[in-house]
Amino acid sequence: MGFARVGVSGFDRFGGAIGVLAVVWALAAGAHAQTVPDVPTVGVATPSDGAASIAFTPGGDGGAAIDNFRASCSPGPITATNSASPIGVPGLTNGTSYSCTVAAHNSLGWSLESGSVSVTPRTVPDAPTIGSATAGNASASVSFTLNSNGGAPIDSVSVTCTSSDGGVSGGGSGTSSPLTATGLTNDKTYTCRAAASNEAGWSAFSAYSNSFVPKAPTAPSAPTIGTATGGDAQISVGFTASSSPGILAGGAAATITGYTATCGAQSNTGGSSPIVVSGLSNGTSYTCTVTAINDVPLTSVPSAASNSVTPLAGTAPSAPTGVAGTRGNGEISVAFTASASPGNFPGGAAASITGYTATCGSQSVAGAGSPIVVTGLTNGTSYTCTVTATNDVPLTSTASASSPPVTPATTPGIPTAATASAANASISVSFVSPSDNGDPITNYRAECNPGGYTNSNPSSPVTVTGLSNGTAYTCAVQAYNSLGWGSLSSPSNPATPSAPTAPTAPTIGTAAPGNGTISVGFTASSSPGTLAGGAPASIDYYTATCGSQTNTGSVSPILVSGLSNGTSYTCTVTATNTASPPQTSAPSASSNSVTPSPLPPAPTIGTAAAGGSSVIVAFVPNVGTGVAIDNFRATCSPGGFSATGAASPITVPGLSNGTAYSCTVAAHNTSGWGPESAPSNSIAPRVQVQRTFVSATSGDDSNAAVNCTSTLPCRLFGTAMQSTVSGGEVIALASGDYGTVSIVKSVILTASPGAAAALTATSGSAVGIVGAGSAKIVLRDLQLVGAGGVNGITMTGGAALSVERCLISGFAGTGVSVSTPASVRILDTIIRDQGGEGIYLTKGAKADIANTKVFGNAYSGVLVDGSIAGTTTRATLSDSVVVGVKNTIDWGVSAESYVATGTAQLEIVRSVIGNATKGLVAYSTGGGSATVTLSRSRVSGNTTGLEQLGAGAVLRSRGNNSVNGNSTNTSGTITPLSAM
């Protein structure tokens, strides 16, 4: 039974392509479908020369008889056919690996290819190329070169050697050149040839090699014995070299590599005659033989025996006797009796003494006989000496018995570094002791000339007395031991005895007062005076005297205490030196007149403000002692942290955030530190942030613990500033009153848009600025209200102030008061209705006032006061309006100076000044300087428009000003300037 699968395809009536795979299974009873044959099963591939035979097993015929088979071998492919297995495939390349498959064919076509089988065609190798044959002992070394391997690796090479004159054939095999052929007959003539094999079989033989004759190696001939000579436990064996060195295997001449001499059981080798054999027994008789060895190596028969020889040891001389020493200067002369026996040579011959050596300590000297002088010894060191004898073997005797002890010595050496030190009618001569040269020094003598004055002493120094003051002497020293006086030293330095002198008087300096004390300054004496003998003395101390009180010291200044405050004193200083007895100078000139005074009073403590790990302490100095204060010190506790400064405030660093501190301030003057002030408010430094917030409606100062954030603002500006970094910003979020504020560091105080933030003062100032010299303050969009307060802004410290878009009104005193050398900017601000000045500048302030309205101020709109000696206070007023109240003291704008070297400078540009008693004034007196320059401005409606008062006042007006409508337009000298 069989089944058929039919595929049907076509197009439908719409023209679209359709594909239909219809599988029709039909039962075909007794009917079979025909196909190509099944794939054969490949078998073994057998290689041959340029061909391969591929065996296989046929598969099914597919229903039609198989009529052929095909083998295909790649690369190529190269094919061949046959009707049955195997199929021979010719035309292949020997040595190339092929992959071969088989297919079967019937009337329907070729089957698929079978699996593959690998085969590499090959043949026998080419014959090797013979090289050289080199004879050996019954052998030969045969070289060759392999040629083509026939397509398969060569697995063996065979060498065969045959004799032409009756020798036994031999050979050898291997895989590489050269090969050794063995089994040959020595002294017969041979030639050799080679053949190679692989898996296909053996190649043809190569050509024959050169002919050669194998030979066995031979030993040298025996040496000829010579004379043997005895020594100390040794014999020197002489001989004549072998006449023949023998031959190497193959017949080449050998080379003798050495000789061996044998005496009894001992032997030694050497390259030539004689050979010394050691290790023998003295007193025993020996004969010796010699053999030769070549580079085969083979050894000759021994030579004939030598003459009989008996080794004997040499002997040393006997020791000298009767050794005795005689001391000298660094030497000993050693006498002795010569050795009784000179000793013998090895073998027994008598020896001769060649010399003697005397040894004392580590020094030895040789000589021919007694005595021997041993030099290089140390005077003062005890020595014993010995003597040895040496013969011409050479052997040295044992040392003699030691001599009695001997100590070299001489008179002492010469003292060195003689130094003369003059005193009163005497000279002390110091020196460095010399060597005693072996005998102890017991005395020294000094001699001073002129006059030959002497004295002695057992040690340095020696003092020579009875000399004349004012006469110069030089002195020499000599030493003495039991051998006598040594030589005099070189003369000392000249020394002139003399009496001691006092120092010169110190030069008085400045006396500075203290609290019941005076610090007396001075310049040291230019000369300290002299000791007895004229050597420079040293200043021992200085004495300062003020009235009846004195004190001593070694350097300037000296503090004299016990004085009365308010009493005037002058002081003197004397110097006392180290002479014996001490000499005191005359007193110095009197000092300046000085009045001791008490310490400065305690400052009045102000507000302590928190910083980051610091506290900023403000204070007000108190003056009452009449002595200028030169420094201040703030101290914060717990911990006693302190810092100093020339003015308020002082920042005390190094504190712990979150710890509460209370601070005091002390003042310093020339009398020292005064008492501490009362303690400040308790304040805790805290972590500082760049921006903090306050609110008049929702603020709470307890929010300082979270740094016064916009969601948790503080109530007052002062509280928020405790959490604000220097240079940071405090923003008012809501309209309302924020009290007053004291500022001690750089900060920006401002109101958020739409908030009317007021600072209202019922006393004092709405804003007090006492910041350190570097503090920069900005006030922006704020209202400063005087409700009984004195000033709107009071600035007594800090580097800069900027007032922007503010309203300052209703203060009993001044709207803006600046009395410190700060840079000030007032911009877009209204300053009105003060009881005093609108703007007051002094003590070197420098202001730029622009786009500002100043009106209704009772005393003055803008006052630039240059009445502080040595300072210049200046201001520029531009694009602004100043309107007075026209009372009897009302000056609209003025520059004023009342003291010599005090300067006020004012420039007005594009501004209006009106309704004042005096509109614009330049006023000076007492040598002061006031300068006003007016440009492109209008001055009208005043009683007097422009007024220049005083010799140091200058009022300059450019031609582009409008000065009219005043009761009196100008008064005094108005200096015209050309219009800009």
Image (cartoon, rainbow, N blue to C red):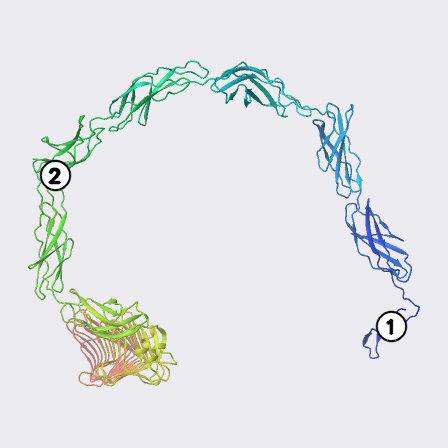
- Measured along the vertical axis of the image, is residue 260 above or below residue 721? above
Badge 1 element: loop
Disc 2 target residue: 422
Residue farthest to the left, as pictured: 548
Disc 1 target residue: 25
Out of 392 and 528, give the one closest to the viewer.
Answer: 392
Q: How far apart are marks 1 and 2 (CA)?
A: 153 Å
Badge 2 element: strand
- Where does the image place residue 186, in percent across and percent down from the top left? 72, 24
Out of 519 and 351, give the one closest to the viewer.
Answer: 351
Residue type indicated by callout 2: Ala
Q: Residue at x 87, y 55 (%)?
A: 69
Q: Earlier in the sequence, mark 1 or mark 2?
A: 1
| Quarter assignment of residue 960 | bottom left
| Quarter assignment of residue 444 | top left
Left or right: 759 as drawn, with respect to 557: right
- Measured along the vertical axis of the image, is residue 517 above or below residue 14? above
Q: Which residue is drawn at 36% across and 76% down?
A: 691
Residue type indicated by callout 1: Trp
- Where does the image place residue 174, in percent across and percent down from the top left? 73, 36
Q: Which residue is drawn at 44% across and 13% down?
A: 349
